[in-house]
Amino acid sequence: MLYNAVYFFWVILISELEDEFEELLDGAVSGKTAVTYMRHFKAYTEFCASLSIPVHGPGSLKSVELWVAALSKKGLCYGTIQCHLSALRHMSKRKGLSVVCQSDKLEIALKGIKKKGVGKESKHAVSSNEVELLQHYAEKALPSYMCMMFQLMVSLAFYGFLRPSEYCITSADHHLRFGDVKISKSKRICFLRLKTFKHSVSPAVISICNSWSKAYPVTELMQKYLDLNSHKLKSEPLFDISIQSFRQVVNQVWDYTMKKQKITPHCFRHGGATWAAKRGWSVARIQAHGRWNSQAYNSYIKPY
């Protein structure tokens, strides 16, 4: 009886630990990313099945190379193909499979795709000059308060490598609040606390320096905005605007630049990462500032 009781205890313990381990695996990426990764992995396995080539194992490198070629032929851009490869890497580890996703030849092919610049969804990387141009034309295109808010938003989005959902209101409730902002005593640095973001539920603090934009110093923009909103609670959204509404304002101001290239709120994140790379930031610094936990940041760095 004692033996049976001990055995039963260990069976339950092992089962609970296995469940805990599965939860840890599931928590490695957000729910939305997990769904995307599963969809990409399924597409890859179906592609391999259609050509009778191995999904995993020693011969999988050739399968991946053909898969990348097929994605490129479909017109997918460099960033989207990188997302597919990130999905393969994650899902193969998750399932305990050996899918070879890296080689010198594959890296060269990816550079070719990046240089080719195919794909309708390829996003424009807004430059720091274009950010200042937007801030300048906002004074003509928008009412006083909206202009001030817009100038601050594009500064934070660009120099903070922010996702639109981190500063605009969404159902995900990830946006910045008044209590998440702090200005240094020297008035030269603005700190933002991001409580949750795409790949993590742990908070992150990023800093934006005045020296990065002499024309529109971020702490001056922020202090003026905070002073005019001193009646707001710390729990209230920093910017009471949706992504869709902000996109419309961006397009409205962008039209003043007379540039043909269209932009979206996400272009500021692309632009910020590209700006940092051109300034010589290290890979680790770019990844930390943009809250990337993989090589996905590469897809955000584009030639001007």
Image (cartoon, grey):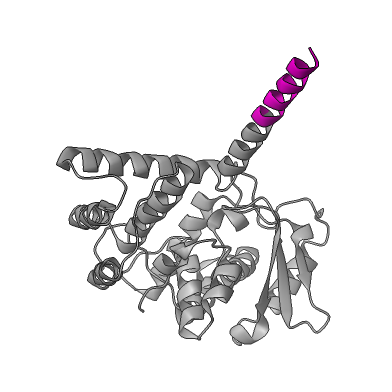
Q: Is residue 205 left or right of residue 93?
A: right
Give x and y (percent) for residue 165: 57, 53
Considering only vertical position in the picture, is 89 above or below 261? above
- Identify which residue, 134 or 164, lies in the foreground: 164
Q: Residue at x 56, y 45 (%)?
A: 30
Give x and y (percent) for residue 277: 47, 80
Q: Quadrant of the N terminus?
A: top right
Q: Quadrant of residue 261?
A: bottom left
Magenta stretch, main secondary structure, is helix
Give x and y (percent) for residue 258: 35, 74
Magenta residues span 1-15
Give x and y (percent) for residue 67: 24, 52
- Identify which residue, 259 or 295, lies in the foreground: 295
Q: Is residue 164 left or right of residue 302?
A: right
Q: Residue at x 56, y 66 (%)?
A: 290
Q: Quadrant of the C terminus?
A: bottom left
Is residue 2 visible in the rendered image? The answer is: yes
Q: Residue at x 57, y 63 (%)?
A: 162
